[in-house]
Amino acid sequence: MRSIIWLVDASFPVRQPGYCAAMRERFGDAAIRVTENHAKFVLVGNEQWTVTLRTSMNLNENRRLESWEVSDDRELYHYLREVVDGIFATEASEQWGRSRSQNRDAFDAETAANSPRRTRLRYIK
């Protein structure tokens, strides 16, 4: 593995301040973005292959039936990568001083009806 980035929900720094601080220390702010997010996926790829892992599981202890799916699907991988790259185009320093409502407003502005990113967020396989 050559690099890793994290896309976490805007509530994460408040709900899990210890985990959030550990992630920031270990990976650095440049590797983490905070946004309105409930999606759970991992993208693993290189020049030869693209793998997407999607799951319903949250990162907590819950005793429920959950699902996960591993896909070797270039279209899905590149769609999700484009969404992540768009979010990572913002400066890391912009996110840490924002309140939850400011993060929500920033997300809403990014996904406004006239935004080019809006169509990417409507992906249907």
Image (cartoon, rainbow, N blue to C red):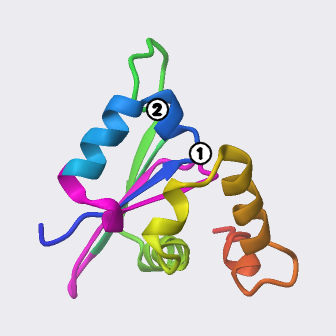
Q: Position of residue 49 (x, y in %)?
A: 25, 78
Q: Quadrant of residue 105?
A: bottom right
Along the line of sight, which residue is nearer the eye, 45 or 82? 82
Residue 42 lies in the magenta stretch: yes
Q: Position of residue 51 (x, y in %)?
A: 32, 66
The C terminus - image quarter: bottom right
In the rendered image, which residue does mark 2 sit on? 58
Q: Is residue 30 left or right of residue 35?
A: left
Q: Is residue 55 left or right of residue 38?
A: left
Q: Which residues are magenta?
A: 26-49
Which amino acid type is marked by label 2? Asn
Which amino acid type is marked by label 1? His
- Which disc is residue 38 wearing? 1
Q: Secondary structure at mark 1?
A: loop
Q: Is residue 103 left or right of residue 2?
A: right
- Which residue is pictured at 32% across the width and 34% down the height? 19
Q: Is residue 120 above or below residue 31?
A: below
How dense is the environment of label 2, judged by Cα within 10 Å: few (below 14), some, or many (20 and up)? few
Q: Residue furthest right?
A: 113
The N terminus - image quarter: bottom left
- Whether tag 2 and tag 1 are in contact, CB under 8 A, the answer is no
Can residue 49 be seen here? Answer: yes
- Which residue is pictured at 25% across the width and 40% down the height? 22
